[in-house]
């Protein structure tokens, strides 16, 4: 009988832990010149597909995705396919912030007792999962920096250092 109670208690604790853990995603997309329509089209499609994957393949709520893209507004152009229109697919805009270093630095701020919160968003704790994607063409251009919105570029090493300061459970990818 004691073994049965102990097994049930372990199962309940495991279920409670699994339910209380949340998943978040952060997408930091490199800034492109607005007059380079091919580059920005490609960047929006790539960024949008990453967000789509987070929502529909990794089961992360759209409300738990925080995106830095260009000037802080979803990319729209005449004739954009509904496939790349956030308001059609997600029923809300996708982009939260412009790609600015201070906003990225403020993304994770310690709140005490091993708890953190996304810049002006709900708290997360160190058991939660945070998936971070940096979207750039670094692989094709052999460059080592990320272009920001109306600011000098930041080195990828510096950006990685900023992100790695968080104690939250995170996975970083450069795409």
Image: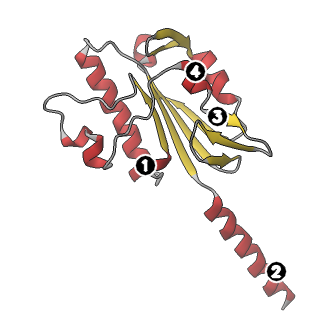
Residue that carries the numbered disc 4 in the rendered image:
102
The N terminus: image quadrant: bottom right
**The residue tagged with tag 3: helix, strand or loop?**
strand
Q: Kindly identify the residue that appears in the image at 64 percent across and 42 percent down.
A: 117
Residue 7 x, y percent position in the rendering: 77, 79
Among the two numbered marks 3 and 1 on one chain, the one whose residue lies closer to the N terminus: 1
- In this rendering, position of residue 49 left or right of residue 130: left
Q: For residue 48, what is the image quadrant? A: top left
* N-terminal-most mark, 1 or 4: 1
Say which residue appears at 29% left-offset and 29% top-offset: 75
Mark earlier in primary sequence (4, 3): 4
Count of number-bearing discs: 4
| Residue 111, image quadrant | top right
Binning the other alpha carbons within 10 Å of mark 3 as few (below 14), some (14 to 19) or many (20 upward) gives many
Looking at the picture, how far across and down is residue 10, in whole percent?
Answer: 76, 73
Marking on residue 108: 3
Q: Residues within 10 Å of mark 1 (few under 14, many from 20)?
A: some
Residues 99 and 49: in front is: 99
């Amino acid at each position: 009988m004691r073994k049965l109670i102990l097994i049930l208690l372990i199962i309940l604790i495991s279920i409670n832990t699994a339910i209380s853990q949340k998943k978040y995603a952060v997408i930091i997309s490199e800034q492109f010149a607005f007059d380079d329509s091919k580059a920005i089209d490609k960047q929006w499609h790539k960024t949008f597909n990453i967000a789509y994957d987070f929502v529909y393949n990794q089961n992360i709520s759209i409300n738990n995705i925080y995106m830095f893209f260009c000037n802080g507004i979803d990319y729209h152009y005449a004739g954009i396919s509904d496939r790349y229109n956030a308001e059609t697919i997600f029923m809300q805009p996708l982009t939260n912030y412009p790609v600015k270093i201070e906003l990225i630095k403020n993304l994770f701020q310690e709140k005490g007792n091993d708890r953190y919160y996304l810049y002006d968003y709900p708290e997360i704790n160190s058991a939660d999962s945070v998936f971070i994607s940096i979207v750039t063409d670094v692989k094709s251009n052999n460059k080592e920096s990320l272009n920001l919105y109306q600011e000098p570029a930041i080195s990828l090493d510096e950006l990685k250092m900023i992100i790695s300061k968080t104690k939250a459970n995170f996975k970083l990818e450069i795409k």
